[in-house]
Amino acid sequence: MKEKFFKRLGWNLLGISVALVFLAPLYIVFTNSFKTAKGIFTNVLSMPVKDTFTVNNYIQAFKDLNFIHSLANSLFITITSTVLIVIFASMAAWMLVRSKSKFSTFLFFLFAAAMLIPFQSVMLPLINLLGKLKMLNPIGLIFAYLGFGSSLSIILYHGFIKGIPVELEEAALIDGCNKFQVFWLIVFPLLKPITVTVSILNAMWIWNDFLLPQLVINKPEWHTIPLKMFYFFGQYSKRWDLALAGLVIGMIPIIIFYFFAQKHIVKGVTQGSIK
């Protein structure tokens, strides 16, 4: 009994230690975002006190970030890209599962192999192509996200669709449905668990992405929150009070989204792997 107790205690202490290592930077960012510049340089680790506490950092950072406009840009790009990925990836995966041929198998492995290609190796040709097509704008960015996000999404959908009985589709065809109706009325509603997972994973990736928007978007009025934060932090690199407040403002939307969606991530991935 004592052995089990000390073993469990050891694992608990290890878990707490690891959690503290990951939470420490968040604590430092959050507490110092409410301090004046003098308060930050006086003691970085302390909580804000009466003489150093201020909320003016957030007010100024909110204005200088043009947060509402940047938020609208991020929402438009994230939602549109995620919806398109869900639509095209689910249809592609369904056809790959139901079309049992060497060509469909080849295509599936091609999508899987595409995940192994580093983004840096296709970065310059992609930007060159988008430039020639005059798509260095949010539309071009959405198009790029559709391409990069489809591979993983198709693999997730592919594993889930295998568990859907083909007899359901055959019965719908006998009742007079065409292929389009079979997919949207019969198959797609059954994909809800994995669709939620695919949507969440892609939304979090697209929302937090910095490199691709920096390469594709070339006008300040199109900047997403991560891109706006990059230029904001560079502008206020010597004003840590404003920079840290800006970082907290930038993190709030995705943190709220994750807390509401985290249970669906585990549930969807688990169901997809079982099926």
Image (spheres, helix red, strand yellow):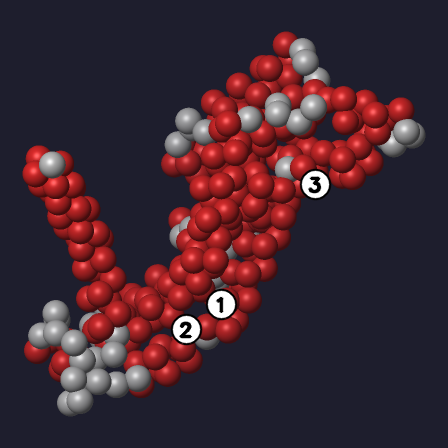
- List x then y, in percent, for residue 87: 67, 41
Which residue is rendered at x = 70% and y = 24% of the image? 165
Which residue is rendered at x = 43% and y = 58% of the image? 259
Name the residue tied to disc 3.
189
The residue sitting at the front extreme is 1
Ranked by sequence position, the earlier of labels 2 and 3 is 2
Name the residue tied to disc 2.
65
Residue 105 higher or lower than 116, as above or below: above
Name the residue tied to disc 1.
70
Report helix, strand or loop for mark 1: helix
Which residue is rendered at x = 64% and y = 17% of the image? 104
* Mark 1, other Cα within 10 Å: few <14 / some 14–19 / many ≥20: many
* Mark 2, other Cα within 10 Å: few <14 / some 14–19 / many ≥20: many
Quarter of the image with the C terminus is: top right
In contact (CB < 8 Å): disc 2 and disc 1: yes
Report helix, strand or loop for mark 2: helix
Q: Amino acid at mark 1?
A: Ser
Q: CA distance from mark 1 to mark 3?
A: 33 Å
Q: Amino acid at mark 3?
A: Pro
Q: Nearer the viewer, mark 1 or mark 3?
A: 3
